[in-house]
Image: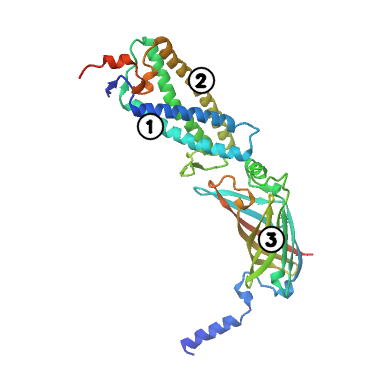
Amino acid sequence: MPRRSAGGYDLVAIALHWTIAVLILGLLVLGFIMTRRSIDPALQFSLFQWHKSFGMLALLMAAVRLVRSLTAVRVKPVEGLSALERRTAHAMHYLLLTLAVVVPVAGWMIASASPLEIPTFAFNLVVIPHLPVPKSEAAEMWWTTVHAVLAYSTLALVFLHSAAALYHHYVRHDDVLTRMLGSRYRTVKTSIEEPEP
Amino acid sequence: MTRKTAVIAAMLLTMSLPQASFSAVDVPSLAEAAGRYAITPGSRIAFAVDQVGGGGIKGKFGKFSGTFNLKAGDLAHSMVNFDLKPESVSTGQDRIDAFLRSGAVFDSSRFETISFRSERVEQTGPDSARITGTLTAKGHSSSEIFDVKLTSWNGRKIGFKVSGKIYRSRYAMDVGTPIYSNVVQFDMVIEGERS
C-alpha cells in the first residue's frame, strides 16, 4: 500500500520518540540497580514493581509507535544521504522500534514464566495478566537472560543512534537531529525554503 | 396430636438434648476438660495472603510451642501462651521463604520469636470461643482476636481450629501491598496434650 510521505515527523511521533527514549534509559538504570545482589529486599521488591509498571507503559507506547511507523506517513530521509547511509539508518530505526517492543515482551515473559507468580499490577491500578506460558525456574532464568542481553544490546544501539544524530547535527549540519526536536528547532534555512503562499 | 403440638413437642425434644448435639464432637463439660495443656508439634500453623487478580501465598510455620490453661469456673481467665519461630516459615518457594525471613518481613535473625499472650476468653457457643490477646512481632505489639472452635477431645488431648485475620501493617511487615493483601488469614489446628 503506497503511503503518503513527509519531510518530517509529526508531533505524536516526536512525543512518542522522546517519551520512549526516557522510559528505556530509566528502565535500564532501574533494571541495573534492582538486580544488584547487595540491595535491600524490600526496596528490591518495590523497584521490580516500578520496573514492571514502567516497562508495560514502554511496551504500550512502543507498540503504538511501531504500528504508526509501519502504517502512518512515511518520513523521507534528509537530503544528501548516500544509499548506504539511508539503508543503515532505516535498518537501525526499525531495529530500535522492534527492540522497544521485544525487550518489554521478554520482561513480561519473565513475570509470566516465574513460579513465584507475582502479579503485574501496573502503577497499582491495572492487573496485567501473565502470558499463557508454562511456569518453571528454568524458563524464568532463560527469559531473564534474553531480557537482559536484549536490553543491554538496545543500550549499545541507542549510543550508536545518538552518536549518528550528533554527527549529523555537528559535522554534517543537516536536519537529522533537529527534525526530531520539533518545528521550533528547525534550521532557519528550512523556513526560507518554504514556498510563499 | 395436632400439627401445632407436634412442632412444639419437637422443639422441646431438641432443647432437652445436650448441647453437644450441635457440635461436630462431643463437647466435654468445662470441668471435665479443665487443666493445663501443652501445644503439640502435631498442630498446624498455616496462613494465607491473597494477591491481586486471584491466588496468593500460602505457607506454614514448622517451629512453635505454647501452653494453654482451661479454667473450669472462669473461662474468661483461661490463658493461652504461644510462641512461633518465623525462621521456620515455608511456602514451597525458597525465594519467597528467604524474602519472608529477611528484613523486609519477619527479620527473623533480629526478631527470633513471634508471641501471643491471651488477655481474655469469651465463650461464643457450646464449642467455640473468642480469644483476645497481644501479638508481638518484629518489635511491635498489637491486640488481636482469634476465633476458636473445638474439633476433638479424647480426655487427654484436645484439638481446636483457630482462625484469625492479622493486619501486617501493624507489625511493619506491609511490604508488597497492595499487590499482596495487608490481611494475613491464619487457619490453625491447635492440638493440646495435658501436661
Residue highlighted by disc 2: A156
Kindly report the distance in space between the C-alpha atoms of the residues bearing marks 1 and 3. Answer: 57 Å
- The earlier-in-sequence mark between 1 and 2 is 1
Which residue is depicted at the point 40% across and 16% down? A89
Q: What element carries label 3?
A: strand
Q: In this view, does A38 lie to the left or right of A170?
A: right
Which residue is depicted at the point 32% across and 27% down? A71
Bin the neighbour count of mark 3 within 10 Å (Cα to Cα): few under 14, some 14-19, many 20 and up.
Answer: many
Q: Is mark 1 on a helix, strand or loop?
A: helix
Numbered disc in front, either 1 or 3? 1
Question: Tag 1: residue type?
Answer: Val
Residue A110, image x, y percentages: 53, 35
Residue A112, image x, y percentages: 51, 38
Kindly report the distance in space between the C-alpha atoms of the residues bearing marks 1 and 2. Answer: 23 Å
Spot the residue most to the right: B195
Q: Is residue B19 above or below residue A148?
A: below
Which residue is depicted at the point 61% across and 75% down? B21
Kindly report the distance in space between the C-alpha atoms of the residues bearing marks 2 and 3. Answer: 59 Å
Residue highlighted by disc 3: B190
Dot 3: chain letter: B
The tag on residue B139 is: none
Question: Tag 3: residue type?
Answer: Ile
Residue highlighted by disc 1: A64
Residue B195, image x, y percentages: 79, 64
The quarter of the picture where residue A18 lies is: top left
Residue A40, image x, y percentages: 64, 37
Question: Tag 2: residue type?
Answer: Ala
> In the rendered image, is residue A163 in sight?
yes
Can marks 2 and 3 be said to lie on one chain? Answer: no
Q: Is residue B36 left or right of residue B164?
A: right
